[in-house]
Each structure stands twice: as C-alpha cells, then as structure tokens.
Amino acid sequence: MKKPDTTKALWIGLAGIALTALGIRVSGAHVVATAWLVGLGFWSAVAIGMLMMILIHHIFDASWSTVLRRQYEHGVAAFPWLLLMFLPLVAASFVGSHDLVWPWMNPDHQIAGGHLVKEDLLYLKKRAFLNLPLFVFVTIGFFALWIWISARLRKASFSQDADGDVKWTRMNGKTAGFGIPIVAVTLTAGAIYWFKSLEYHWFSTMYGVWYFANCMRGALACGVLIMLWLYDRGDFRGILKTDHLWAIGQLMLTFTVFWAYISFSQYFLIWNANVPEETFWYNIREYGDWWYVSLFLVFGNFLLPFLLLLSYRYKVSHAAIRRIACLILFVIFVDITYNILPALQDAKGNPQPFLSMNLLWAATSVVGVGGVCIAAYLRSLPTTKLIPIRDPRIGECLSHHE
C-alpha cells in the first residue's frame, strides 16, 4: 500500500479555516460562527455514522462489511480533531454577551415580540436543559465518549492483526452492545443542543432521528468514495467486488427512504397539528429562496437518489455509484444548512437569503473541517494493515456474493 500524502488535505483544511475566519471581517462573528457550525455538523455526522456502522457490524457479526469496517476505523480518528475545532464555539460562549451562536445563552437577548430570553416562558420551562454549564459539559462529554468508544474498537481490531486472537472480536462485540445505545442517545442530544436549540421555541420529537439518518447516509457515501479511491490506487484490486458495492448501495437506498420517512413524518405531524410553536420553523423555511431549498431537498435528497439506487446497474457501476455518493453528500450539506442558517434572521424575523455570503462561509467551513478530518484518516491509514487480515470473517468477506 502506497503511503498517502496527508499534507495536501491538511493545507486544504487550513485554507478553508482561514477563509472562514476572514469572513468575520465581511459578515461578522455571529454569521461566521453559525456557518462554522454547519461544517462541524456535516463532518460530525459522517464520523458518527462511521462509528455507528462499525458498531452495527460487530453487533450483527457481519461478514460482507469487514474490509469496509477497517476504513471506518481510520475515519473515526477524526473525532479528537472535531472536538478541537468545536472548542472555539464553546470558548466564544463565555465571551461578551454569550450569544454568539445560541441566543438562549444570553438572558438579555431580545427575541421576536420585543421581550428578553429571561422573560420568555418557553425558555424558563427549558432552562434546566438550556444552560451554558450543562452545554459545555455535555458537548465535551459527547466527544469524549465517541473518542473512547472509537479507541476501544480501533485497539481491538488493530491488535487482532498482530496476534489473531478471537478475544478481540468478542471485545468489540461487547463494545457494540453498550456503544450503540450510548452513541444513539448522544447524537440525538447533540443534534438538539447544537442545531435545534438555535430556535429553542421549536418542538420536535423526531429531530435526533433526522440527524441519525444523515449520519448513516454520509458514512455510507464516504465509504463508497474511499473504497473506489483505494481501488483506483490499486490497493483494493482483488478485494473490492461488485457484490460489496451492491450491498452498500442497498444500505444507501434504505437510509434514503428512511430519511424521507422521518422528514415527511415530522413535517406532516407538525403541519397537521398547526401549533404556532411548531409551525413557525417551517414558515421561516418557506420564506424567500428557502422555499426552493425545501423543494430541492424533496427531489435531491430523496426522489433522485431513490430512483437511481433502485437500479442494480447503477449500484455496481463505479462511475455511477461514485456520482450518487457525491450527490448524497452534497444534499446532506444543503440539508444541514437548511436546518442551521435560517436561524440568522433580520430585524423583522425573516431568514437571511440562502444565496448569500452566509452560504459561502458554510461552504468554506465544510472544506476547512473536512480537510482536517481527511488528513486524520490519511494519517491513520498506513498505521495498520489495509484490511483486517486475521478477522474471523475476512474469508467470507473476500468471497462475498449476493
């Protein structure tokens, strides 16, 4: 296996971070910090999805995904860097009026209607959850748990390459047993704290599941791109088979339908109930050019990938599945942007346009955070075997058939 060059990815990441930071002089710290949350939300979703895929692999004792699992084990090496890049938002919460990103952090923040956060009944009902000390504690705690679970999985898997002891497989099975509920709860709470609380008046019991759907779709799409990149380099020649692509394409189709089910159910239930504390969230996102973003998500995030992934030919064609994976990653970026950026509103309470400088800073933040995460993956890649050569299921994986 050729040693990958991490320098290029790291420089791209640093360039993206620098461009995002320069945006403070153009659009202000509040706008750029909120856009930075888009980049963190996107790449955290990919990393969490990779962690969940590893855990699901072990809990089901799967065989076909063994070689893909190794790439995800390298991918979760990004968690410490994601925490590091999240810390500026945490630190900024202690500076000035505390509401650089999240308005509820400042009791004197004026909200729609002319009254203050500290006078708002909904905030008073939620302040046991929405308070700065708890926010800092759980944010660092969530990343610490993800880093710890990832480290256990990586240690056991990499150690098995050296001694072939089946005890490492059993250890990862136990880790999966407690890891899945921990990751499920923490990703749900993280999505509520980091994204949903930007508009804390809003109620939705399905929000965490929406984020989970994007986590899984992002991880699967990145898995396709990684495997095809390794195949094109020559490392996966004789390893990656048509049936592996078919299997991961099936999962991509499954979670595309799952995303549509969750998103439609959330919209239908909120709109049908017609409660102002819930419907305002969608009213904002049907204002101006955000209406077209809403329509794009229906067709780009569901209908188009759904129709493409129904085809066996597209799932096993390298060129086709690569394009579908890129499409899914792009629409996940748009979906996370759709959930975060409308929180940036003008004096009348209307969201700033989608096609604005805000979108540019969101894009540069995705590039910046992504460059660092990709560099973390590339740095981890040559530290162990390309595939888990002594895993009990590796033989079944290499001879996998439908």
Image (cartoon, rainbow, N blue to C red):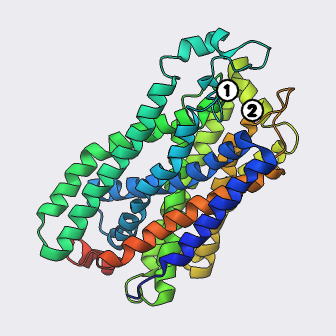
In terms of image quadrants, where is residue 332? bottom right
**Quadrant where the N terminus is found in the figure:** bottom left
Q: Judging from the image, what secondary structure is the residue with disc 2 in? A: helix
- Between 271 and 313, the one lying in front of the other is 271
Res 254 visible: no
- Residue drawn where x is 62% and y is 33% of the image: 266
**Quadrant where the C terminus is found in the figure:** bottom left
In this rendering, would 181 be left or right of 28?
Answer: left
- Residue drawn where x is 54% and y is 28% of the image: 205
Q: Disc number at residue 84?
A: none
Q: Judging from the image, what secondary structure is the residue with disc 1 in? A: helix
Identity of the amino acid at label 1?
Ile
Res 204 visible: yes
Residue 53, horizontal then vertical, whole percent: 39, 57
- Give the mark toward the camera: 2 or 1: 2
Q: Is residue 46 above or below residue 197?
A: below
Residue 238, horizontal then vertical, whole percent: 38, 89
Residue 252, horizontal then vertical, whole percent: 53, 61
- Between 395 and 140, the one lying in front of the other is 140
The residues bearing labels 2 and 1 have C-alpha atoms spaced at a distance of: 9 Å
- Residue drawn where x is 57% and y is 11% of the image: 124
Instruction: For the residues labelled 2 and 1, say whether their Cβ atoms are less than 8 Å apart.
Output: yes
Q: Sort mark 1 into few (<14), some (14-19) or many (20+) by Cα contacts within 10 Å.
A: many
Q: Disc number at residue 282?
A: 2
Q: Is residue 168 above or below residue 24?
A: below
- Residue drawn where x is 32% and y is 80% of the image: 398
Q: Sort mark 2 into few (<14), some (14-19) or many (20+) by Cα contacts within 10 Å.
A: some
Q: Disc number at residue 270?
A: 1
Identity of the amino acid at label 2?
Tyr
In this rendering, would 223 be left or right of 323?
Answer: left
